[in-house]
Image (cartoon, grey):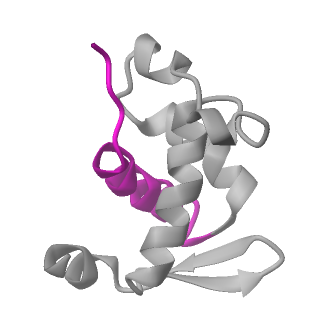
C-alpha cells in the first residue's frame, strides 16, 4: 500500500522554503513541494483525508498545509500574515524534534 506521512513531507517543505529564499506564501509552497520532492505518482494521487476532501485536492497538498502549521508550532517557520511564512533557524529546531 502506498502511504504518505507528515514525516515524508516536512523536510521537503523546508527545502521548498529554502529554494524560494526562505519566505513564501502557502499556495506557492503547495506548488513547489511536488516539484522538488521525490514522491511517487501513486503518492501524488492519494486523496485527502475524508473530512478534508472539500479543502484539498490531494493528500500531498493536505500534508504540506499541515506541515507548515506544525513547523510553525516547532518554531521553524514564522507566520507573517496573509498566508506568508518565513523560515527561521531550521537546522537546530528540526534536529531536536
Task: Please name the residue shown 26% across and 83% down the image.
Answer: 93
Percent x, y for residue 81?
78, 83
Q: Quadrant of the C terminus?
A: bottom left
Percent x, y for residue 89?
35, 85
Q: Is residue 8 magenta?
A: yes
Above or below residue 69? Residue 34 is: above
Q: Is residue 87 magenta?
A: no
Of residues 21 and 88, the one nearer the viewer is 88
Of residues 51 and 12, the one nearer the viewer is 51
Percent x, y for residue 21?
56, 68
Start-end of magenta stretch:
1-23
Q: Residue furthest right?
A: 82
Task: Please name the residue shown 74% across and 52% down the image.
Answer: 27
Q: Residue furthest left?
A: 95
Percent x, y for residue 82?
84, 76
Quarter of the image for residue 20 reads: bottom right
Above or below residue 80? Residue 57 is: above
Q: Quadrant of the N terminus?
A: top left
Above or below residue 10? Residue 49 is: above
Task: Please name the residue shown 51% across and 21% down the image.
Answer: 46
Task: Please name the residue shown 39% across and 47% down the image.
Answer: 9
Tell me which secondary structure the magenta stretch mostly adopts.
Answer: helix
Taking 27 as reference, is 60 left or right? Answer: left
Q: Residue furthest front?
A: 51
Amino acid at each position: 500500500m502506498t502511504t504518505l506521512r507528515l514525516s515524508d513531507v516536512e523536510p521537503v517543505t523546508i527545502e521548498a522554503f529554502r529554494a524560494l529564499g526562505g519566505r513564501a506564501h502557502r499556495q506557492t509552497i503547495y506548488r513547489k513541494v511536488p516539484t522538488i520532492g521525490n514522491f511517487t505518482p501513486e503518492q501524488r494521487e492519494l486523496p485527502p483525508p475524508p473530512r478534508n476532501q472539500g479543502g484539498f485536492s490531494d493528500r500531498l497538498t493536505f500534508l504540506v498545509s499541515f506541515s507548515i502549521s506544525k513547523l510553525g508550532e516547532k518554531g521553524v517557520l514564522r507566520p507573517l500574515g496573509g498566508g506568508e511564512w518565513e523560515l527561521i533557524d531550521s537546522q537546530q529546531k528540526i534536529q531536536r524534534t
